[in-house]
Amino acid sequence: MKRRVVVTGLGAVTPIGNDVETFWKNVKAGTVGIGEITRFDTSDYKVKLAAEVKDFSAKERMDAKAARRMALFSQYAVAAAKEALADAGIEMEKEDPFRVGVIVGSGIGSLQAMTEAQQKLMEKGPSRVDALLVPKMISNMAAGNISIATGARGKCTNVVTACASGSHCIGDAFRAIQYGDAEVMVAGGAESCVCPVGIAGFTNLTALSTSADPYRASLPFDKERNGFVLGEGAGVVILEELEHAKARGARILAEVAGYGATADAYHITSPVEDGSGAARAMTDAMKEAGIEPGEVDYLNAHGTGTHHNDLFETRAVKAAFGDAAKNLKINSTKSMIGHLLGAAGGVEFIVCVKSILDGFIHQTVGTKETEEELDLDYCIGAPVYQEVKYAMSNSLGFGGHNATLLVKKYE
């Protein structure tokens, strides 16, 4: 028998708020967190915009000495995890630490640490490379640093599936609790690579929007979409076995109902054109939940604002939902915060939970007009106020990785 898994805590660091309350308030207001890149001089770059985290102070969110030994993505992860644990009311001294695990991923790790080390190596020689380069750089250190900061000693891993990393981490944490590996899991994703090589690499891949207008840059499903906007941050949630949560009197926010994970086996950057890989992830999640397509109220789409993603994801939704697709409310949080890569799935899962709690589905901000094949309800022009019983989140990663999470109102 698979055990029931609920959500009891949320934590976020985003381009429109460094905690969940601020982030959600700005989501509801339709705030766009995209602006000119401040981290480096973009004079020689085609891309001038990103969705940077603003006014983040690591020393206010964690041990200052420990923070100095972390790359930025790990700092974001620890800050979000600590917020999520506090939100859940988890007191580690009352838990068996070996039954509290961490699965928090990053698609890239620290590009900054790598490029700074390379520059020092070339200019000043090998002896000047930071002794902490490796533990700052490697992507598993988001999970490792959370474990060290919180005392969680159970299963501690990370999933690296590019832009699907955060969703796969939550899915694997869900499975860990279902099958008895843990009672509590800290799960999600973190990312920070708004830096010269990150922007240059994605630009030369023709993946990024070259718009100079922050309000017409990240345009999921819009006929004028021309690439995604690079974002950064972290989204971390607390998943808990239902009876464990009830026994300690936890406030239960939602229940995780299903998880689907597939591969396209098609192309290193493009989803398969008929959407069959993502469609199967969605149908697998619905099958696990024991529901029909018409019962899903809302889909938080991967919705990057690239030509291929938005077209092929729309095809996937139509394949998975059939006639019910036309009644499904669909949006993309990336319209406000850009694409957080490995952190996207964690933050977007939080949006699904908050949408269930508040009966609120945000608009796809900035998107004005779609094109012929993009004919579903993408929540253009205004948010939607309605009951949300079942919410779904999609994440699709380079390499053909598909992840779908299905969360429902707790009853």
Image (cartoon, rainbow, N blue to C red):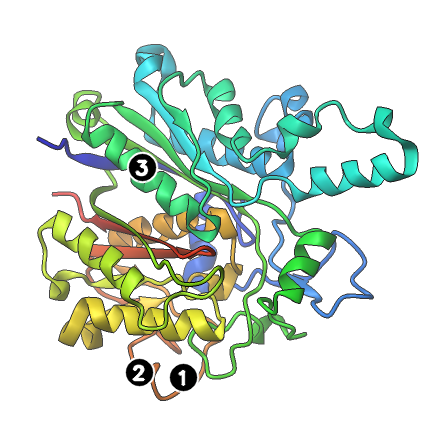
Residue 277 drawn at (x, y percent): 30, 61
Label 3, on which residue?
A: 172
> Rounded to the nearest whole Å, what is the CA distance between mark 1 and mark 2?
7 Å
Which secondary structure, mark 3?
A: helix
- Give the residue type at disc 3: Asp
Identify the image quadrant of the C terminus.
Answer: top left
> Rounded to the nearest whole Å, what is the CA distance between mark 1 and mark 3?
35 Å
* Residue at (46, 29) in percent of width and height: 82
* Residue at (25, 23) in percent of width and height: 181
In the displayed structure image, the side of residue 126 where residue 401 appears, left or right: left
Query: Foreground mark, 3 or 2?
Result: 3
Closer to the N terminus: mark 3 or mark 2?
Answer: 3
Relative to 297, does residue 171 appear above or below in the rendering? Answer: above
Label 1, on which residue?
A: 370
User: Which of 391/174 is in front?
Assistant: 174
Closer to the N terminus: mark 1 or mark 3?
Answer: 3
Relative to 360, does residue 221 appear above or below in the rendering? Answer: below
> Rounded to the nearest whole Å, what is the CA distance between mark 3 and mark 2?
33 Å
Q: Are marks 1 and 2 in contact (CB under 8 Å)?
A: yes
User: Which of 299/358 is in front?
Assistant: 299
Q: Which mark is on residue 375?
A: 2
Which secondary structure, mark 1?
A: loop
